[in-house]
Image (cartoon, coloured by chain):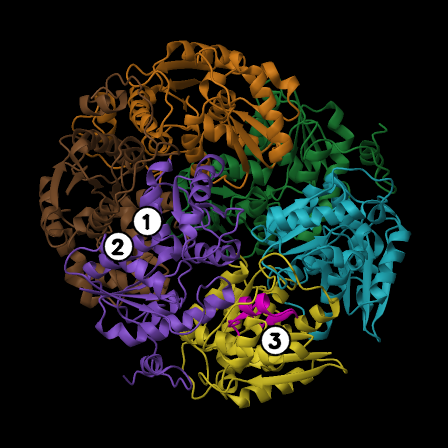
Chain colours: A yellow, B cyan, C green, D orange, E brown, F purple
Amino acid sequence: MKIVLVNPNTSTDMTQRMVETASTMLPPGVELLALTADRGMPYIASRTEALIAGQLTLELLAEHAAEADAMVIAAFGDPGLVAARELFEVPVTGMAEAAMLTACMLGQTFSIITFSRTLVPWYEDAVALAGLQARCCSIRVPDCTFASVATVQNELEDELVALAERAVLEDAADVVILAGAPLTGLAERIADRVSVPLVDPLLAALGQAHLLARLRVRAPSRGRFARPDAKPAVGVAPALRAWIERSA
Amino acid sequence: MKIVLVNPNTSTDMTQRMVETASTMLPPGVELLALTADRGMPYIASRTEALIAGQLTLELLAEHAAEADAMVIAAFGDPGLVAARELFEVPVTGMAEAAMLTACMLGQTFSIITFSRTLVPWYEDAVALAGLQARCCSIRVPDCTFASVATVQNELEDELVALAERAVLEDAADVVILAGAPLTGLAERIADRVSVPLVDPLLAALGQAHLLARLRVRAPSRGRFARPDAKPAVGVAPALRAWIERSA
Amino acid sequence: MKIVLVNPNTSTDMTQRMVETASTMLPPGVELLALTADRGMPYIASRTEALIAGQLTLELLAEHAAEADAMVIAAFGDPGLVAARELFEVPVTGMAEAAMLTACMLGQTFSIITFSRTLVPWYEDAVALAGLQARCCSIRVPDCTFASVATVQNELEDELVALAERAVLEDAADVVILAGAPLTGLAERIADRVSVPLVDPLLAALGQAHLLARLRVRAPSRGRFARPDAKPAVGVAPALRAWIERSA
Amino acid sequence: MKIVLVNPNTSTDMTQRMVETASTMLPPGVELLALTADRGMPYIASRTEALIAGQLTLELLAEHAAEADAMVIAAFGDPGLVAARELFEVPVTGMAEAAMLTACMLGQTFSIITFSRTLVPWYEDAVALAGLQARCCSIRVPDCTFASVATVQNELEDELVALAERAVLEDAADVVILAGAPLTGLAERIADRVSVPLVDPLLAALGQAHLLARLRVRAPSRGRFARPDAKPAVGVAPALRAWIERSA
Amino acid sequence: MKIVLVNPNTSTDMTQRMVETASTMLPPGVELLALTADRGMPYIASRTEALIAGQLTLELLAEHAAEADAMVIAAFGDPGLVAARELFEVPVTGMAEAAMLTACMLGQTFSIITFSRTLVPWYEDAVALAGLQARCCSIRVPDCTFASVATVQNELEDELVALAERAVLEDAADVVILAGAPLTGLAERIADRVSVPLVDPLLAALGQAHLLARLRVRAPSRGRFARPDAKPAVGVAPALRAWIERSA
Amino acid sequence: MKIVLVNPNTSTDMTQRMVETASTMLPPGVELLALTADRGMPYIASRTEALIAGQLTLELLAEHAAEADAMVIAAFGDPGLVAARELFEVPVTGMAEAAMLTACMLGQTFSIITFSRTLVPWYEDAVALAGLQARCCSIRVPDCTFASVATVQNELEDELVALAERAVLEDAADVVILAGAPLTGLAERIADRVSVPLVDPLLAALGQAHLLARLRVRAPSRGRFARPDAKPAVGVAPALRAWIERSA
């Protein structure tokens, strides 16, 4: 089985950390192909950036969809997720959606903890897209700043632990999601310091992708996610264009 | 890894079929312990029966919770699911919840197809419990009758296929869930005759239980699902009583 | 007219207090038969306990349904309410539902005040079951502890008054419900110290049961609450079994 | 105990029928004072008329609020209900709200059956005001016409029975509310021909008013329904003006 | 083009200020006819007063509907708006609705800032009527008092600015609506002191009325807002009666 | 005043028709600059295409934002609307949002009528984004096919009229929105054949853009729509890149 993972940020360090974390989760026999955007932003934060990242994600997925058993969009916020499900025939998961749905089996309410206020509107969109507003009791951000997304999970570790506990006590969160690719791997490290289950979105997205691949459901030929008919797509990157034009 | 599966109906034939279907899904190294209720109803249909089945489920789970890595409540409607999550420290999944959350990654809307009208109010409860009313576009039942729950999936196969297609065309379903333990295994057989992905709730519940076990999240010590303090429980079955009284 | 009241807790003292409070409310000519669970928990607090109490409630109701004009489930949280309405043909009310619906005629929003944090998830379930989340502006609990459920309404009287006022000022509650059977009778005592109407759930449940009995509506033969067909129910308590099997 | 009932239509025949129906419900010792609007419309149907009727209702209530233990607004649609609760210190019920809340104890969903399409938007408002959209599965009207509101319940009896059954079968209604003052008394006559419980809104409103009066809750001094401070009200009918100006 | 504006309060000073503010907004060629209620309350605050004001509004509108291209109800809370749309064939806007819908194009969430706590329940009604509860993140009121509605916008200017900023920081408001006719004109004056866009409801209502008039949509002959059939309306003010009776 | 309109489809004929329709609406002194995408799809239909169109829209808007008083995204579905509001400081409207909000002032419910089934999921997204699901009573599409988007409004005129009337009668629509840029101008032609008001989304979007420009609200410096800090944006089209990098 082959899972394709797309990091829509241009940071290869982040992709590398994801690969390392994934290796603790994926069973033997599952090959992981991890791709990094070669254009765009080092770290997506606004909804403008998420829109641009959505197209970059589609371009990368289009290059490898034919060989994949499942695909993962490795940014909390899931840029391009709906379009990817429409366009490609293998299962696609996103970190935000997978984390939230997984959290729904561990408690009634979840809180999303992240590290930068600029991310919040985008994450709100992800909650709304999943229709899980009633189960998301808060999106919380520490008040302090940090030097780099590469080290933010270490810099803010104590603040994030404290924030998680506040989400439990003040927002009645049953589960805490540590959101944003830069926090990948943190959940395992701080699990003993937080009084409710923590969800690591990358592990959730990989686990759900793996599960969907094993279920071997057929791709839809009707409904919102049936692959669209061929359409000219001038000026679109080659692999994506070929996929949209069904010329590949 | 050991997964405990409880069939809260008294039908051992149904448990046997579940074990066979599960064997196609579970990876090597996962042991499945499948239990069947020895009291109660041959097949739960009403909400009264679901309430009684909830307690029977807790009793069976209590006998084996200490040895399990994850547990599955193998009746669509998930009798006892909330209580089980509160009481036990290992992950617990239910067929209805797992099927619906899995469907949410395959489309925006799902329809639940089942075989008997008496089941509908109970299934409505499961949709409401998950807060997924906005994504469940219909619960549909064939108009015809059947001879036995043991053979209903064969007796009504054509009707269920037709009903699934109507859910797609008339209700705009992106995914169809074949609900009710007696339909276990049907999804694979009819997948090619339905134009959208089908979800088999048993496979979803087992897959999600397996995933949750692999995530190794810690049990909560706070929140709605922290294990309650010890409490006297007179007249309750021994293993469940011991679990509630924390005397085991 | 005969109203059957079931206290699903094993505390007979609590039943006694309920009978005394009821006597101030029920008009002449209404007979009240008050029953106490002889198994289970002295005071239901968790959702596991509520599930078990639901079955005990059905067992007690089944013993007396034939002679009742209306029945009351006398625990806030209403264990077994939906099943009881499905199974029995006389009207059944529950303290939580009756209190909330009564509150809806006294204001737009209500706050639920109770005495122990462990009760909150169960009460949340009751609000959700009634679909009244938008009208329930808070569920509040004092921060202090108490010695006994038998005396909690006296021990915490000042704290509960203060909490009710905070619900009015901070949560914009128009009505306050004093929830939990141990608070029965408190509303009348503190009414002059709280600036909005107080609802005593036992009086609401008895009053609504009495009203429903006087309306003499017919039992449904269709819909979610039509009595289910006979069904074998092995291992279930005799009166309940007879009711389910329609063999009484 | 004295209950004041206001018919905001100018039809005294309708008031007379209400009094007769009420006499079957109210216990001995309850005095009913029934008032009829002396201006306005013979039968309120549009939302413009409902707005005008709201003020007429307040005027009539203001004349008798001081002597009442509870008051009933006897038009389905409840003109002036919110204002009356704000202004007066005794409990006030309305036919629509009381019928819907009563129906909520008899089933999960209710359908509202009435006799004229022009009433539907106003009744939709009543459902929305109560926040019960999720429990109201339909508002249905027969396709045929009728000669007079005085006789409409006889003219359309068969059509209304058929419509109620369709609401049960097609809309999954657990309860049917026969809405509109001209249908007062019909529920009892056709109860045996409909397969679910029927609610007569007048009986519900009277019963709930009686119940609220017996609960003797105190009037709020804070919150949305605290009586407003005195205010000049030039050109308003004398009793209402005196009430608003607190000059009575 | 002629726009009729009704101030349902009896304060002509307020009408005068509205006319001045309007003059900054309306393009040349638009005539504004501004009317003031000659009965009722100097300043509507409660829902009782809003009900009475609704009828007064209809009376004034009825006197001028035949000559208007669009009409504006110039009180936040929009007394009589639904009825006016039903009754009259030209477009009608209200300050609350127009302000909220305009705010929806400037951000995702809005906060309503006003000057008196007694207004809040009425404004809540306006939010609910528009179905915009999910976008209204707060309704806020300063804690301090003021001497006169005529000068309140100057008296409380600093407090209102501070409150707007709190709505941005604490409630995540993207837009702030300065609600209540006495705040007309304030938005322009304090715009530079608030960090998000401010909406002046009078300008929004006039602007939307102007826009609707220019769209020249036809009046409905079906649906909720088709003009009702003629109906006797005894005791109603002449112009309104003539409109309802279609005798004008 | 200058309004920039972006047609994110590559069809210049469609842009031309929009300009002609706009000329009937915009007052003298308003300059309209209409742009057409030079890459992408001739007519956006799927959500993949909408994602790509979103970025193209941002690119075109970025080229002209500095000179605009307001900007219009001229495709029903509003590709890039949220990002554009975040990125640019002048008001931006979209055809779907503006049409729906305008419809909300003409009735309680609206139906969206369009010409191709493939558009429906995208339009559903627009309804959800505006949070207006409760007011959108249907999205309807004729069952027949058409030869060209350039002539579809003529080819299907009778079918669209009939569909609008069905939306009124069967879905209780108070207003009908004729959705999709190819239907621009149709509303005026068929207004007399439909019994409720019709909204032309282009006129609504232009009218609302004009109104917002005249309100001269300040751009937010806080909240979800404050312009993001400068950010490197490698590989993004020059004008958009300069805007994101704040280097222009």
Kindly check if marks 1 and 2 are in contact, taking CB atoms under 8 A apart as contact: yes
Kindly identify the residue that appears in the image at 53 percent across and 21 percent down: D200
Q: Nearer the viewer, mark 2 or mark 3?
A: 2
Disc 3 marks a residue whose amino acid type is Val
- Mark 2 surroundings within 10 Å by alpha-carbon count, few (fewer than 14), some (14 through 19), many (20 or more): many
Q: How many marks on residues? A: 3
| Chain part drawn in magenta | A76-97
* Residue C42 can be seen in this image: no
Q: From the image, which quarter does the N terminus of chain A lie in?
A: bottom right
Please give the residue where the numbered disc 3 appears in the rendered image. A72
Q: Position of residue A229 (x, y in %)?
A: 57, 64
Q: Is residue E248 left or right of residue A26?
A: left
Q: Which mark is residue F102?
A: 1
Give above or below for B145 relative to B211. Answer: above
Q: Are marks 1 and 2 on the same chain?
A: yes
* Residue D184 can be seen in this image: yes
Q: Position of residue D199 (x, y in %)?
A: 56, 24
Q: Nearer the viewer, mark 1 or mark 3?
A: 1
Q: Nearer the viewer, mark 1 or mark 2?
A: 2
Specify the subunit that label 2 lies on: F
Residue D12 in the magenta stretch? The answer is no
Specify the subunit that label 3 lies on: A
Q: Position of residue B184 (x, y in %)?
A: 80, 55
Q: Which mark is residue F207?
A: 2
**How far is disc 1 from disc 2 in space, using C-alphas?**
10 Å
